[in-house]
Every structure is written in structure tokens, then in C-alpha cells.
């Protein structure tokens, strides 16, 4: 059973918005574009894995959690996907590279071979997985759980993979092979019963924290005034929607909407800073009327803090509720 689904990562949401709002001639534009592509490819690879994992339907109780972010010994660690069976836990790491990847042993080396033949050594994913196994073991240990933990490295099929000498410890496969790999896992010893698997999955969800890279202006060292304001039309993707007759109107395509400022508000929090005043709202939506701004802000699902000159809005805290029993 899938206990935690994957949603679009915050970093990708933020980069999509930053890319729309950063002028093409901005000095940081190439870096933003590059990271956007890397992030998009990573997410696509993970979605591909999820689709294959859906084929895995064993007759024993199990839990699958996608995109977990946990803390142990002061360090946060992110797990692409996690499988809990009665006998073991598997940490799955997904890589989606379009270039050919060569894996060599003794010493372990990951080399990317570009289309022009250039070769570039990469960070060794086995080391990353080993660290995550170590941290998860420790995380479980503090909760009195001892169970074998394996790592699984998967590559999306679009990538050409050449494994010269496979790692003896961590299995390396294509994502489409994941269900077959899971089916081959031995489930002899029942360390965790159905109830314990269910509780463990819910405890992980309770301790999961969404990775928060915001605001991206700080992270990329971009002056907030370089980020283009304006309400972007969801129909034609052009900025410059104007408020009139109780709705947003797109001068480019004629699209109208009452709620188009919601995304603009989200963009502000992702890109600029974690609070927004009435004046910030008017600047970022390019709206002149303070009272209209107050009315729209009140309906934006934000929390108002302070009064008069100190009044500002922040995002509501998201509540997390554990998955109910099947
Ligand atoms: Zn439009």
C-alpha cells in the first residue's frame, strides 16, 4: 500500500516560477535554466519509478513511501522512495541522466560520457545511499526497531548504462526492473507484523518535513527587484493581467479569472520573502487600489499577523495527518 504519494518538489515549483519571472538577459538566467532542467529530469525519473512500483502488489503487508525527508543526528536526509516489508527495508535512489553512465569498481567510479565523447566523473551514488542507510538505521534504532536495510540504485531507461563491475552491496537496475526486484526479495523472517509496518509508515510521515528552499532570491543571490512583478495569465502564460469588473483580465488573450492572483501570491513566497504586506501585494500584482488589495488578500488563504502598519500576511501552516487504517 502506498502511504505517501509524491508531489511536485518545492524546488521545482519555485524554479518554474523563477524562470518565468527572471528576464532572459539576467546574469543568473543560465544557472536557473540549468537547475530547472536537472530538477525536472529528476522529478520525471521519480514519476517513472512510481508508475513501475504500482505494478508491485505482493500478498503480504507492506508500505511504500515516496519522497521522504527525515532528520537524524542533526542531519536531514532525503529518500526518493522507501519500501517496508515484514523482513527488510529498501531505500531506492532514482537517477535520470540522459548521458551514458559507466560504473566501474575498485575503486568505484561513476563516469558520465557525453555525446561528444567527453567523460566526467560524478559523485558516487553508492556513497550517498550508504550514508542514508546509516542515518535511517540510527533513526530506527532510537525507536527500538532493528531490521535489515538495503539500498537500490535505479536508472531511467532513457539512459545508457554500462556496469563494468557491479557493486556487490547495492543493486543497480533500470527503474522498470524494480517490481521484479521487489518480488524477488525474500520475506521469510517476520520482523515487523502488519500493525508494526502501518505504525512505522505513519511515524515516518509524522516526522517528514517538506524540503524548503525558499525564498529562491536569497538562494540564487538575486536582487528581488530584478524579479518581474505582475499577474501571469494561466491561459497564455503572459504577465500583465489587469483587475477590473471584479476579476482579472488578460489583455493578451482575453482570459478572465477571479483567482489568478493566488499563484502570484505563491510566487512571492517562493521567490521573494516569507511575509507579504498590502503594499507588497499591490507591487507584485501591479494593482493600485489598497482596499481591493485587502479584499483579495483576505481571500488568498493567508494568515494575517499584526495590525495597522505592522500588518502582514504569512502562509498558513500546513497540517499533516497520518494515513488512516486501510
Ligand atoms: Zn492570457
Image (spheres, grey):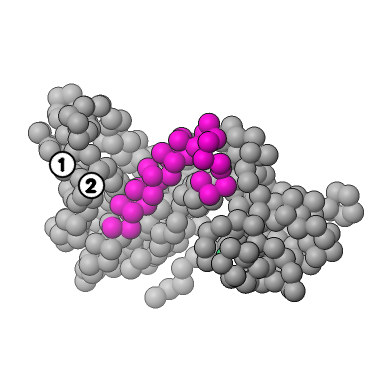
Q: Is residue 148 left or right of residue 18?
A: left
Checking the image for residue 26, the label placed there is none
Whether residues under marks 1 and 2 lie with C-beta atoms below 8 angstroms apart, the answer is yes
Q: Is residue 71 left or right of residue 292?
A: left
Q: Nearer the viewer, residue 75 or 126?
A: 126
Above or below — where is 308 with respect to 134?
Answer: below
Above or below — where is 181 with respect to 298?
Answer: above
Q: Going 68% across and 39% down the picture, which residue do you hit?
A: 225
Checking the image for residue 161, the label placed there is 1
The residue lying furthest to the left in this view is 164
The span shown in magenta is: 19-48
Q: How many numbered circles does the render carry? A: 2
Question: Which residue carries the number 2 mark?
Answer: 155
Q: Secondary structure at mark 1?
A: strand
10 Å neighbourhood of mark 2: few (<14), some, or many (≥20)? many
Q: Going 17% across and 29% down the picture, which residue do you hit?
A: 117
Q: Is residue 23 magenta?
A: yes
Above or below — where is 107 with respect to 188?
Answer: above
Q: Position of residue 312 (x, y in %)?
A: 79, 52
The chief SS type of the magenta part is: helix
Q: Going 14% across and 29% down the picture, which residue do you hit?
A: 105
Check the picture and name the quadrant holding the C terminus: bottom left
Check the picture and name the quadrant holding the N terminus: bottom left
Q: Nearer the viewer, residue 221 or 311?
A: 221
Q: Is residue 114 magenta?
A: no
> Closer to the N terminus: mark 1 or mark 2?
2
10 Å neighbourhood of mark 1: few (<14), some, or many (≥20)? some
Above or below — where is 319 with respect to 122?
Answer: below
Amino acid at each position: 500500500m502506498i502511504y505517501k504519494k509524491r508531489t511536485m518538489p518545492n524546488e521545482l515549483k519555485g524554479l518554474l516560477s523563477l524562470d518565468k519571472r527572471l528576464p532572459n538577459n539576467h546574469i543568473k538566467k543560465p544557472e536557473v535554466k540549468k537547475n530547472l532542467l536537472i530538477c525536472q529530469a529528476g522529478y520525471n525519473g521519480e514519476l517513472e519509478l512510481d508508475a513501475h512500483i504500482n505494478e508491485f502488489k505482493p500478498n503480504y503487508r507492506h508500505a511504500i513511501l515516496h519522497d521522504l525527508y527525515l532528520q537524524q543526528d542533526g542531519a536531514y536526509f532525503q529518500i526518493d522512495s522507501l519500501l517496508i516489508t515484514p523482513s527488510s527495508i529498501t531505500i531506492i535512489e532514482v537517477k535520470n541522466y540522459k548521458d551514458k553512465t559507466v560504473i566501474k569498481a575498485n575503486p568505484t567510479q561513476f563516469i558520465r560520457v557525453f555525446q561528444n565523447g567527453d567523460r566526467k566523473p560524478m559523485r558516487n551514488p553508492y556513497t550517498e545511499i550508504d550514508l542514508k542507510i546509516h542515518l535511517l538505521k540510527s533513526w530506527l534504532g532510537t525507536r527500538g526497531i532493528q531490521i535489515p536495510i538495503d539500498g537500490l540504485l535505479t536508472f531511467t531507461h532513457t539512459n545508457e548504462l554500462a556496469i563494468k563491475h557491479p557493486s556487490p552491496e547495492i543493486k543497480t537496475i533500470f527503474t522498470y526492473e524494480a517490481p521484479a526486484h521487489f518480488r524477488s526479495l525474500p520475506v521469510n523472517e517476520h520482523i515487523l507484523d502488519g500493525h508494526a509496518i502501518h505504525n512505522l509508515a505513519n511515524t515516518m510521515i509524522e516526522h517528514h518535513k517538506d524540503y524548503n528552499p525558499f525564498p529562491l532570491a536569497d538562494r540564487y543571490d538575486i536582487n528581488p527587484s530584478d524579479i518581474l512583478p505582475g499577474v501571469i495569465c494561466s491561459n497564455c502564460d503572459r504577465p500583465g493581467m489587469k483587475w477590473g469588473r471584479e476579476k482579472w483580465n488578460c489583455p493578451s488573450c482575453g482570459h478572465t479569472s477571479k483567482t489568478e492572483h493566488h499563484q502570484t501570491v505563491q510566487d512571492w513566497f517562493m521567490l521573494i520573502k516569507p511575509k507579504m504586506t498590502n503594499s507588497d501585494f499591490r507591487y507584485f500584482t501591479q494593482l493600485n487600489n489598497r482596499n481591493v488589495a485587502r479584499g483579495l488578500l483576505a481571500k488568498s488563504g493567508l494568515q494575517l499577523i499584526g495590525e495597522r502598519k505592522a500588518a502582514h500576511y504569512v502562509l498558513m501552516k500546513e497540517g499533516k495527518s497520518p494515513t488512516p487504517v486501510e
